[in-house]
Structures are given as structure tokens and as C-alpha cells.
């Protein structure tokens, strides 16, 4: 998707995680054009087992064509019997 230059741009998505809650294991990362823009880690406020809206500022990509990738890594083979990660209503916006 191409984002207009000089406009506010962002990504929003609904997230449900039923995984290990710490920052080391079961890591969800959002990439834009190959760069990490959001990570479920110790600095993010992700509550397990509830739907929540995540918003990522993409203003740094204004005037560019963007590709978004979601990547989930369990990191290890322990405690992986939970439901995992669900995403819904993924939206890229570019306001006037």
C-alpha cells in the first residue's frame, strides 16, 4: 500500500494472545518494509486472553509504499499448548 506524503499514517489491529506472557518467549513482531515497528515484549502492554486494539504509528513511512508482516515465534518448545495468537480487523490508515 502506498502512503501519501505529509499525512498521518498508522496501522491498527485487534490482537488476542493466549501464550506465555513474558518478554522472552512467544514473541509477536510487526514489520513494515522489513523493519520491526512493534514487538510483544516487556515494554508493550499486552494483556493475555482478551481482545485489544494495537495502534502503530507509520508516519515515518509517509510517501512510501509499505508491506506489513506479522511474525510469531515461540522461541522454545515448552508451554506451547495454548491457543496462540489471533489477529483481526487489520487496517492501514492514511488521514488527510
Image (spheres, grey):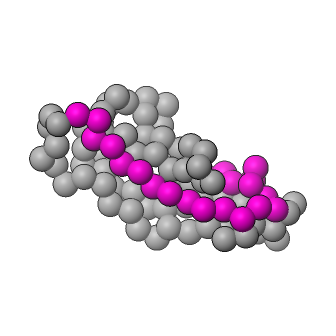
Quadrant where the image shows the N terminus: bottom right
Residue lying furthest right: 6
Residue 75 in the magenta stretch? The answer is yes
Q: Which residue is at 32% across, 60% downward?
A: 86
x, y percentage for residue 46? 40, 43
- Camera-side residue of 56 and 64: 64
Tag count: 0
Q: Which residue is at 50% across, 67% downward?
A: 90
Q: Which residue is at 56% across, 69% downward?
A: 91
- Position of 85 relative to 96 (above/below): above
Q: Tell me if 77 is positioned left or right of 73 in this view.
A: left
Q: Which residue is at 16% across, 49% downward?
A: 82
x, y percentage for residue 51? 36, 58
Q: Tell me if 39 is positioned left or right of 94 in this view.
A: left
x, y percentage for residue 72? 36, 48
Q: Is residue 20 visible?
A: yes
- Position of 23 relative to 13 (above/below): above
Q: Is residue 7 visible?
A: no
Quadrant where the image shows the C terminus: bottom right
Q: Which residues are magenta?
A: 56-76
Res 58 quadrant in image = bottom right
Residue 79 in the magenta stretch? The answer is no
x, y percentage for residue 77? 17, 36
Amino acid at each position: 500500500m502506498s502512503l501519501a506524503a505529509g499525512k498521518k499514517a498508522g496501522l491498527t489491529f485487534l490482537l488476542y494472545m493466549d501464550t506465555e506472557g513474558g518478554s522472552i518467549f512467544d514473541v509477536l513482531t510487526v514489520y513494515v518494509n522489513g523493519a520491526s515497528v512493534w514487538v510483544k515484549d516487556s515494554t508493550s502492554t499486552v494483556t493475555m486472553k482478551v481482545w485489544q486494539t494495537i495502534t502503530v504509528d507509520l508516519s515515518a513511512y509517509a510517501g512510501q509504499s509499505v508491506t506489513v508482516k506479522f511474525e510469531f515465534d515461540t522461541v522454545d518448545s515448552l508451554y506451547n499448548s495454548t491457543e496462540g495468537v489471533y489477529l483481526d480487523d487489520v487496517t492501514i490508515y492514511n488521514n488527510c
